[in-house]
Amino acid sequence: MTNVDVQVVPGRRLAVVRRRVEIGSVGTAWGPALDKVWAFLRARPGLRTDGHNVFPYHHPTGTDAAMEVEFGVEVIRVFHAAGEVVPADTPAGEVATAVHRGGYDRLRRTHDAIHAWRARTGRTFAGISWEVYGDWSDDPSRLETTVFYLLSERPPVRRRIVGARTSVVIDRTIGHQRDRSLACAAYPDVDQRERAHHIGPFAD
C-alpha cells in the first residue's frame, strides 16, 4: 500500500521547456523537451550541481483539455531564458506526497493513491502537481520518483456561540476569538473563569 504524507515543502528552482500535452501523451513529449534543457545546462557549467529531473503538471479544469507540462531540471540560481529553455519554480506550500518505487510504467498507481487519499480526507488540490525523479538505475526496482500535489488551504472552521441576546463566531484557523467580550456576555450566569473554560481561547 502506498503511504501518502502531508508536508510543507519549499519551492524548487528549475530550468524547463514548456509543452501543451494531451492527456496520455506525456510519454512521447518529455524526451525531446528534456533534451533541450540538458543541452542548455551542458553549455553553462555550474548552473546545475546535483539537481534532479522535475516535471510540474498544470492541471486543466476539463478532463479532455490539453495540459501544460514543464519538463525541467533543478538548478541552483536564477538565469536568463535562452530559446525555449526558461526559468520556473515549483510552488512552496502544503502538499500531499508519496514515493513511487519501481518502473515508470507503474507511476500512475502512486498518483491514484494520492487521489484516493484526497477522496478519503476531503482535501482539495490546488491545480498543480509535480514529479521529482531520483537517480537513474538500469534496475527498475531501484528507481524512485516522488510525487507531490499542492493542497488548497483549509477553509476556516467556525463555531457560533449563541446567548440570549448575542452571538460570536470563533475562527479556529487564526486561533483567537473575534469578540471575547460578546462571547462572555452570552454566559451571564457563570464567573469569568467558567466563561474562559466555555469559550476558549481555542474553542474545540
Image: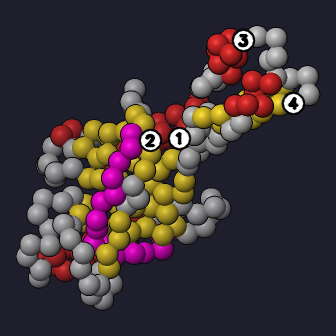
The Cα–Cα distance between marks 4 and 3, rounded to whole angstroms, is 18 Å
Q: Earlier in the sequence, mark 4 or mark 2?
A: 2
Residue at point 82%, 11% (across, down): 189
- Badge 1 is on which residue? 115
Q: Main secondary structure of the magenta part?
A: strand
Q: Nearer the viewer, mark 4 or mark 1?
A: 4
Mark closer to the chain start, 3 or 1: 1
Say if the magenta span includes residue 197. no
Q: Give the structural element (helix, strand or loop) at label 2.
A: strand
Distance from Cα at disc 1 to Cα at disc 2? 9 Å
The residue type indicated by label 4 comes to Thr
Q: Which residue is mark 3?
A: 191
Nearer to us in this view, 134 or 88: 88
Q: How far across and how far down the image is residue 23, in percent?
A: 52, 62
* Mark 3–mark 1 distance (CA, rounded to whole Å): 49 Å
CB contact under 8 Å: marks 4 and 2 = no
Please name the residue that numbered disc 2 is placed on.
Answer: 96
Q: Quadrant of residue 54?
A: bottom left
Q: Is residue 56 above or below residue 105?
A: below
